[in-house]
Amino acid sequence: MLSRELDSQCGVVMSDEYSGWDPGRPGHDLLDILKDEIRTKGQPSAERVREIANLTGTTAAKVRGVIGYYTELKPDNSTVRVCMGESCRARGSELVAEFLAKEGDTVGILHCAGLCTSGPAVLRDETVVPMGSTGTGLQLFVSMDSISQKLGSEEVVQSLIQELDENVSITRTGSRGLFHLEPMVEVDIDGTRHAFGPIQSGDVSSLVSAITNGSASEHPAALGPIDSLPGLSSQTRFALARMGIGNPLDLEAQQGLGAYSGLNKARDGGAELVLQELEAAGLRGRGGAGFPTHFKWKSAMEQGDPVKHVVANADEGDAGTFIDRMLMEGDPHSLIEGMLICAETIGASQGWVYLRSEYPQAKRILQSAIDSAREAGILGENFDITIALGAGSYVCGEETALLESLEGRRGEVRARPPYPTEQGLFGHPTIVNNVLTFSMAAAIMREGGSVVGSIGTERSKGTVVAQISGDVGIPTCVEVPFGGSVADLFRDHSSLDEVVAVQVGGPLGGVFAAEELENIELSFEGLSAADGLLGHGGFVCYGNKFNPRSEVLGWMRFFRDESCGKCTPCRIGTQRALELLQRIGTDSEKEGDRTLLADLDEVMTETSLCALGGLAMNPVRSTMKRWPASFGGENNE
């Protein structure tokens, strides 16, 4: 493992191997030092900035540049933070923020908390440690997913512990993804797990009575055997195969469910077998770009550099997407296994998980899983994993900006080529994939590439993990084969009742009228043909309170604020686009504004360095096209 020694003043002494590409790149510890410094002492003085620069082997100018870039390196006196991501905004988060402010809270804003199906998300500085119990008596299972907790799972478990005797076993699991039924309690009755939900703490007494007197099936919240639930039985679960079944931190139990069996196959068959299986499965990156995974891994494998890195992009910043968080909380060993398979394939010795700071429970569970894998000898001498927390930057979800952040710099996008597979972290070949992609890689090696690749469409093979949230009656997370229409997805697993609009693929994705979804194929190509994108598989629904103009302005403000500033088309273009959009459709509109907006769209789309600038006009364009009355009616072309 490549490492650095922390000195007594929280400084770092860099090894030549670690910083050999550029000694001015101090590593991610600089961000950690600055976060701790600012949280405990406030903004550092000029003298302290110089001290930190000397301790981390960089310059004071670079330290000041880092401080000025990241949101979390600024003093924050908020008592509560409210999510303003699309899912929560569709469910009234702006009104919640106004109410809390009137009640005396100092309200801070964040873009996405990854709690999309339970929003509006309101976060206070508190730590919730899931409760459970071990025993040989009644066997119960309750999700400890962060969304489950927001919906009341901890109160339910506490009531169960109070109602039942000390012999009860309450196993905490990941979520099944059926959030409209959460909190859900599963009970082992004669060897079959029966589900009950949604259950609140006030329902526990009647539930316990029904179970103990043999009338469980008659309880109002009884759902029947969990494996027979239509919402589950109609799925094809590879990445989600172990979700909700057992304790994600019980390594032995997870291995009994197939964890690390794919790694064993990869080791037995070697790198070429792994690449063949990934190609047969048709695995494409699930973080947004959809690039064939086997091509990327092969490129890194062929590099002659003896030092290589594997990086999991867990900076899941697109509102309406939360599967990476779910996996890290509910099946962290699938991520570790996928990263190990990648490391074995390309010859890497060091792994990193770049994790959003908004995911504290994911960090706790993932770190515990890493520790247990290390103790079992799965991680260690040949390959190890370090968690690096982000500091608040949407652009750091882009792979090169993420690498810059890992190097202790401003998270600005790099020009390509060279690509990360050639020169990535600290100049060494690096694979960057998101959490879901690594989990799918592990599943493919476990199940076989031909099995996964036999379903889906010709070019979008396998499954998609669809996350449906926002103003929708049945919020859910499901894994289904590619193919069919987007409307089919909703019919089978959610509902389009009273849904007016759906944004697919995050804030940079296209916005569609609900009735259009019937004719859009659920695939990378289907969404692209409709001038949209699949992205990370998020589907954010808007109801009859949808305000197209307000949403468009909100998106462009967000893009302007989150632009890294590296390229002019995005840095200046987002601000100019916002100015034009504020005028268009009002009495302030000027002749030529719409032509100028179209020209600006072309420049940003064609010349920006990354997808933020390149796709920023995508939701604007699609919304103005479908709801012209909100932007001046017939004047909008």
Image: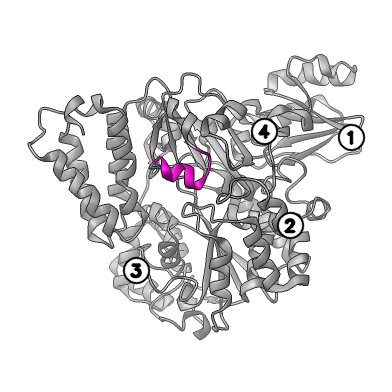
**In magenta segment, residue 380:** no
| Residue name at image x 14 percent, y 28 percent | 586
Q: Where is residue 392 in the image (x, y as percent from the top left)?
A: 41, 53
Whichever of labels 2 and 3 marks the residue nearer the N terminus, that label is 3
Q: Distance between the residues labelled 1 and 2?
A: 41 Å
Q: Which of 48 and 451 is in front in this view?
A: 451
Q: Nearer the viewer, residue 555 or 408?
A: 555
Q: Position of residue 290 (x, y in %)?
A: 50, 54
The disc at residue 509 is none
Considering the numbered disc 2 on the image, is that residue within a helix, a strand or a loop?
loop
Whichever of labels 3 and 1 marks the residue nearer the N terminus, that label is 1
Whichever of labels 1 and 2 marks the residue nearer the N terminus, that label is 1
Q: Distance between the residues labelled 3 and 1?
A: 60 Å
Q: What residue does disc 2 label?
A: 448
Based on the displayed image, in which of its 4 quarters is residue 372 positioned?
bottom right
Considering the numbered disc 1 on the image, is that residue within a helix, a strand or a loop?
loop
Whichever of labels 4 and 1 marks the residue nearer the N terminus, that label is 4
Q: Which amino acid does label 4 sit on?
A: Glu
Dots 1, 2 in contact, CB < 8 A: no
Q: What residue does disc 4 label?
A: 154
Whichever of labels 4 and 2 marks the residue nearer the N terminus, that label is 4
Based on the displayed image, in which of its 4 quarters is residue 516 positioned?
top left
Q: Is residue 60 above or below residue 193?
A: below
Dots 4, 2 in contact, CB < 8 A: no
Q: What residue does disc 1 label?
A: 167
Q: What residue does disc 3 label?
A: 415
Classed neighbour count for the residue bearing mark 4: other residues with Cα under 10 Å, few (<14), some (14–19), many (≥20): many
Based on the displayed image, in which of its 4 quarters is residue 146 positioned?
top right
Quadrant including the C terminus? top left
Considering the numbered disc 3 on the image, is that residue within a helix, a strand or a loop?
loop
Q: Which amino acid does label 1 sit on?
A: Asn
| Residue name at image x 9 percent, y 40 percent | 592
